[in-house]
Image (cartoon, rainbow, N blue to C red):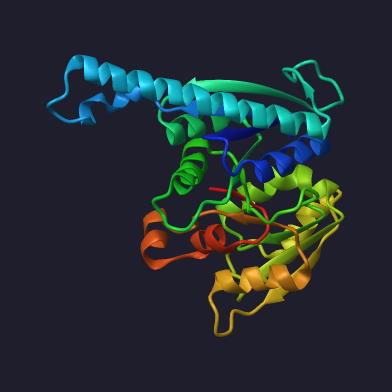
Amino acid sequence: MRTLLVPMTGPEGQAKVLEIAFALARRCTAHLTGLFIRPDPRAAIPFMGEGLTADAIQDLVDAAEREGRARAAKSQAIFESAREAAGVASGDGIDGGETASASWEEAVGFVADRAGRAARLADLTILAQPGEGSADEGGELLNEVLFRSGRPLLMVPAGATADTGAHVIVSWNGRAECARTVAAALPLLKTAQRVTLLHVGEEHPDRPGLEALRIYLARHGIESEAVRREAEGVSVADAILAAMQDCGGDMLVMGAYSHSRWREMILGGVTRHAIQHAAVPVLMSH
């Protein structure tokens, strides 16, 4: 893991994300990019309504531009403060050194769209846990990174601790999304003090099971233990989160949206439930 990305849309609610992002950068001797995306106020001109003069529209655009630059400056100050507190040097991360580095970038466009595209060249994108409701900006950002980037992300709840990843729980179902996520998580699994492999319910006979996963990880030098749970009277998602708490895990690794995203939005699902209710960071990939 050599390239980490933190998309920032404003100065609010970024402290915990940055704390964990810089901790991971140091742990993996990686480069961390803070990316601030300013919405383009000109894109809203067709929606500003009739009855406004060209001068009035330009005044609104200029005001939005000033506000965007002010938010970018505040966000950069928070990023730089977190960088200094973590003892991470400013740089571009291409010198092949053995220390972490960080840099700041700004872009203009649709926030979720630009973040999703930028994440394609990040080994891991780190985001805050979205607020309640499926229409909030954080939820859209998370989904766009998942589906546009083809790369993993780490969702960070507000109550997470900076030393997350000491005990990693891998929620395994043998599906392709889960396998992709495990592969992406290998650098963190290698540095974890403990790795637990979790399967809820009966294993599918045509998919790789927990023992096959244990052997795969062992070949990477990762020791793990298997835990099987039944979802008796509760959903699979609730069983996973309950096992996380019982086992004392501080990071969850899981595949995202094994079923259709729209099906999960309408009927509910493991991914959606984890996004809304996880109390520890969740590493996921689609």
- In this rendering, the answer to whether 188 lies above or below 214 is above
Residue 121 appears in the picture as rendered: no
The image position of residue 2, as x and y in percent, is 74, 30
Q: Quadrant of residue 237?
A: bottom right
Residue 285 left/right relative to 161 = left
Q: Nearer the viewer, residue 247 or 229?
A: 247
Residue at the (61%, 74%) spot, across then down: 239
Residue 226 image point, x, y percent: 77, 68
Name, please, the residue furthest toward the left. Answer: 51
Q: Residue at x 63, y 69 (%)?
A: 240
In the shown orientation, is residue 225 left or right of residue 233?
A: right
Q: Where does the image place residue 244, in percent across and percent down from the top left?
A: 70, 67
Query: How many numbered circles does the render carry?
Result: 0
| Quadrant occupied by the N terminus | top right
Q: Eyeballing the image, is 24 above or below 94?
A: below
Given residues 100 and 132, the one toward you in this image is 132
Residue 204 or residue 270, whichever sits in front: 270
Residue under the point 66% across and 35% down: 123
Measured as percent of width and height from the top left, residue 215 is found at 79, 57
Q: Quadrant of residue 133?
A: bottom left
Placement of 172 over or under 48, stated as above or below:
below
Residue furthest toward the bottom? 233
Q: Is residue 273 visible?
A: yes
